[in-house]
Amino acid sequence: MKNTATKKVLALSLLCIFTLTYLQSCSTTNKTTKGTVIGALAGGTVGALIGKKAGNTAVGALIGGAVGGTAGAFIGRGMDRQAEQLKQTIPGAEVIREGEGIIVKFDSGILFDVSKSELKTAAMTNIQNLAKSLKDNPDTDVTIIGHTDNSGSDEYNNRLSERRAEAVKTFTINQGISASRINTRGKGESEPIADNNTEEGKTKNRRVEIVIVANEKMKADAQKNAG
């Protein structure tokens, strides 16, 4: 029964991501319409994240890394422990435990000055603590995703979000984390999670999401334990 429910949630979430990808390819579809579709399609625990907590790229990374079943439950228990560690050591971030992974979400203002991609000095402690958690949990891969609000041009926002994701990656590598574990993506203004017509909404949309999922070794170990 549990596996059937999990498959339904994953299938619905994949449908959401497919639809969102299509919408993003349509230049005539405005951001408000996209946000409405996100909310309409969101269903189940993972789907609810798309509209309320994180962009669809982050949720897609969680779904793409999932193995499901007993092995997935084994991975999930390990992620539970890491998420608790992150909540204790990175008070400036929102830690979202979902499925077989973790999303660590920073408001961009915590990490960067406005329109800048150089990490603030105070922000470095947060990334150092994140790197320590990654060292303590070596069998994980990481995707760093930069987002902006809709101020400025699409081209400018895309470049800014890419530079910010790369800045977090570079500093994390400098703390001793292998570059092979880290991917970056800059999504610019394309994945809002709040209304860009308000200052509060713009603040929420300016963010960096760090997605942590099991690597192939952890998945293999989980399959063995499941067997």
Image (cartoon, rainbow, N blue to C red):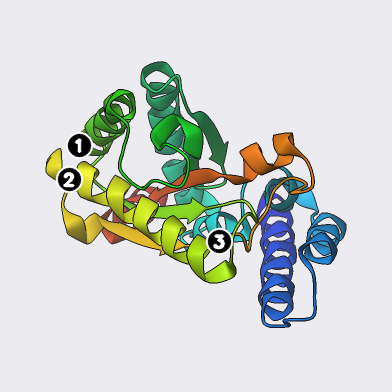
Query: Pointer 1 and pointer 3: residues touching (CB < 8 Å)?
Result: no
177 vs 36, nearest the viewer: 36
Where is residue 61? Give x, y as percent: 50, 60
Indicate whether 182 appears above or below 74.
Answer: below
Where residue 41 sits, quadrant-wise, is bottom right
**Type of amino acid at the residue the image marks with label 3:** Thr
> Above or below — where is 21 with respect to 190?
below
Whether residue 113 is visible to the viewer of this picture, yes or no, is yes
The mark nearer the N terminus, 3 or 2, is 3
For marks 3 and 2, give the CA distance. 23 Å
Is residue 187 visible in this depiction of the protein?
A: no
Amino acid, disc 1: Lys
Real-space CA distance between mark 1 and mark 2, rounded to the nearest whole angstrom: 7 Å
| Left or right: 173, with 162 as reference point | left
Label 1: which residue?
Answer: 135
> 105 or 122, which lies in front?
122
- Give the labeled residue for mark 3: 57
Q: Which residue is mark 2?
A: 177
The residue sitting at 48% across, 60% down in the picture is 67
| In-image side of 143 versus 96 (left or right) | left
Q: Nearer the viewer, mark 1 or mark 2?
A: 2
Q: Would you call the spot at circle 1 few (<14 residues within 10 Å), some (14-19), or many (20 or more)? A: some
Residue 155 position (above or below residue 176): below
Residue in view at x 67 percent, y 82 percent: 25
Quadrant assignment for the C terminus: bottom left
**Residue 158 image position (x, y, % from top left):** 49, 65
Label drawn at residue 210:
none
- Residue mark closest to the camera, 1 vs 3: 3
